[in-house]
Image (tube, rainbow, N blue to C red):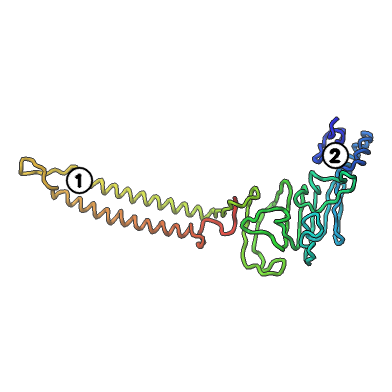
Amino acid sequence: MSQDDKYTTPSKLIQPIVDLSRTDPLKREIYSNSSDEQKVKRSGVGGGSSYLEPVPIYDACPGDLIMGPSRRNCEIRMIGDRDGVSKASGTAGKGALGTGAVQIVAGAMGPYARERDDEGEPIKCGPGHKTNSAEIYLSQRSHADEYFDLCNGTVGNCQNASAAVIKADSCRMVARHGIKLVTGTDARDSQGDRVSTVQGIDLIAGNQDDDLQPLVKGDNLVDALSELAQQIEKLREILYSFVTYQSEFNNSVMTHTHNSPFNGIMTAMGFTAMPNEMKSSIQILAQTVLSLESHSATLSLWQQNYLSPVQKTYINSGWNNTN
């Protein structure tokens, strides 16, 4: 019988997601000596109390209020802002005012949860922002990006500011109507300082911010590409006209013949070709060259409208980025 089989329910319907060897040794011994009926009752099947669940104790500060932990290793902590095991960590640990925090934890210490150390002493844990299975963390004043080891992105780090963080293996936001991600709503922040700039939204995969680029504004991009397609079509028409004019002139020259009075000896070009040559030259100058100049100016204006960050029609977002 394997270690896992020894401590799972007889039905084996539920497989442990934590190492049960981390459970209190005394509880393991009691469980292993229990009857099958008692094991089922103590296993947590059907929503009952999970006897074997490793439940570490939060190392609370004197001013903290802790609701829990439950036998399922869940609790609500009303604490001062704190980062690590040290009670001197975080903004509250520095003695600052306005540093209240609420931490809702499911699975403290995650897969590393233990109740006792190798010497049999009870395990006490800190906030565990990096190891908890799932948590919601609200802080009045925090360095949240540092606590959760997040890259800067373009919006920068949260420094001495209020923060709300949701962390789990998978996060879902579900709305029966709409979801809005909105920044820059208030004139002042949580510390009373005036908000002087608008910060955007970073969509960062892999916690890597070395290749963040602005999100494209779809409507502007459609307008830009549509206008560019029209300009390309105009350029095609200009070149087609040039080819037509040149072709007419070339055909006139190729089919022209001279009547020499000296036994058929070749002479200078006849005057019959000159009108066509002059007409073709005028058409090339008036139609093709001038059209190309106009087309160049139009393309420059297009670039100014859609590729310049100062224009309202700029195809990129001025604030929101992704990798």
Where is residue 23 drawn, in percent x and y? 87, 42
Q: Position of residue 226 (x, y in %)?
A: 46, 52
Q: Quadrant of residue 293 in the image?
A: bottom left
Q: Earlier in the sequence, mark 1 or mark 2?
A: 2
For the N terminus, the image quarter is top right
Left or right of 187? Residue 50 is right
Check disc 1: other Cα within 10 Å, few if <14, some if 14-19, many if 20+. Answer: some
Residue matched to label 2:
21
Q: How many marks?
A: 2
Image position of 152 (left or right of 113): left
Mark 2, Cα crowd under 10 Å, few <14 / some 14-19 / many 20+, is: some
Relative to 141, is 49 on the left or the right? right
* Residue 254 seen: yes
Disc number for residue 252: 1
The disc placed on residue 132 is none
Residue at image coords 47%, 54%? 224
Residue most extreme to the top:
1
